Each structure stands twice: as C-alpha cells, then as structure tokens.
Image (cartoon, rainbow, N blue to C red):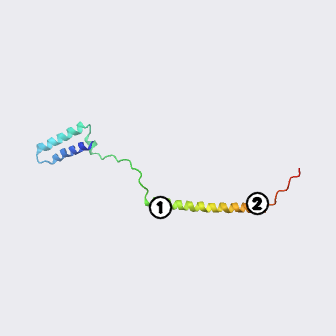
Amino acid sequence: MRATDAARLARILALLGSDQVGERAAAAEAAHRMVSRLGLRWEDILAPAPKAPRLPTSPSHDALDAAQSRLRQSMRENADLRRRITQLQRRIEVLHQQQPPPAPDDD
C-alpha cells in the first residue's frame, strides 16, 4: 500500500470514533471499498509488515577485539617461525662447513 493510500485510510478509520452512527457506518463502508479497490484484504493491512532481511552490521567491539588479538598472535607465530628458520639455515651452513670435501673421482 502506498503511503498516500495508507494516510487516506487512516483518515477514514478515524471517523469510526464519531458520535454519529451514520458517520461511523459510512466510514466503515468507505474503508471497506477502499481496501477492495486496492485489491487487498483486511488481513493484508492488519498483519505486521514482513521483516526486511537483516543487513550485515559492523562487527561488535568484542568480535573486533578478538580478531585483532588473533592477528597479533599470528604475527608473533610468524616471527617465531622466521627466527626458527634462520636458526636452522645457520645450522645447515655450519654442518656443510664441517663436512670434508668430497674425494676426487679416479676415473
């Protein structure tokens, strides 16, 4: 229902509170005609509007704090792993230096 139709129907329905019996009856009849003319049923008008799909909202502070904490933890893990890789590379270099050179082939 358009806003203008809803406003008009509201004005008509307000007349249902009239002290005059005829005015109340005319308002009820006018409201019924209007609803029929719009191709609606009273159930359509009186039922609550369907809820609009919920749009994603910005993350809560708790979710944001948790994500930032996890990011910091991952960055620390990465730094630790890089240090460990560097240590292992140095150890491999030392082991290579300690190995005697291969014997020449006597072909």
Judge whether 51 appears above or below 32 on screen.
below
10 or 87, which is in the foreground?
Answer: 87
Picture quadrant of residue 23: top left
The residue labelled by disc 2 is 96
- The Cα–Cα distance between marks 1 and 2, rounded to whole angstroms, is 47 Å
Q: Amino acid at mark 1?
A: Asp
The residue labelled by disc 1 is 65
Is 57 on the left or on the right of 17, as rendered? right
Mark 1 vs 2, N-terminal side = 1
Bin the neighbour count of mark 1 within 10 Å (Cα to Cα): few under 14, some 14-19, many 20 and up: few
What quarter of the picture does the N terminus occupy? top left
Q: Position of residue 47 (x, y in %)?
A: 29, 45
Q: Position of residue 100 (x, y in %)?
A: 81, 60
- Give the structural element (helix, strand or loop) at label 1: helix
67 or 49, which is in the foreground?
Answer: 67
88 or 50, which is in the foreground?
Answer: 88
Picture quadrant of residue 38: top left
**Residue occupying the point 64% across, 63% down:** 83
Is 60 on the left or on the right of 26, as rendered? right
Q: Amino acid at mark 2?
A: His
**Residue occupying the point 60% across, 62% down:** 79
Q: Position of residue 57 (x, y in %)?
A: 41, 53
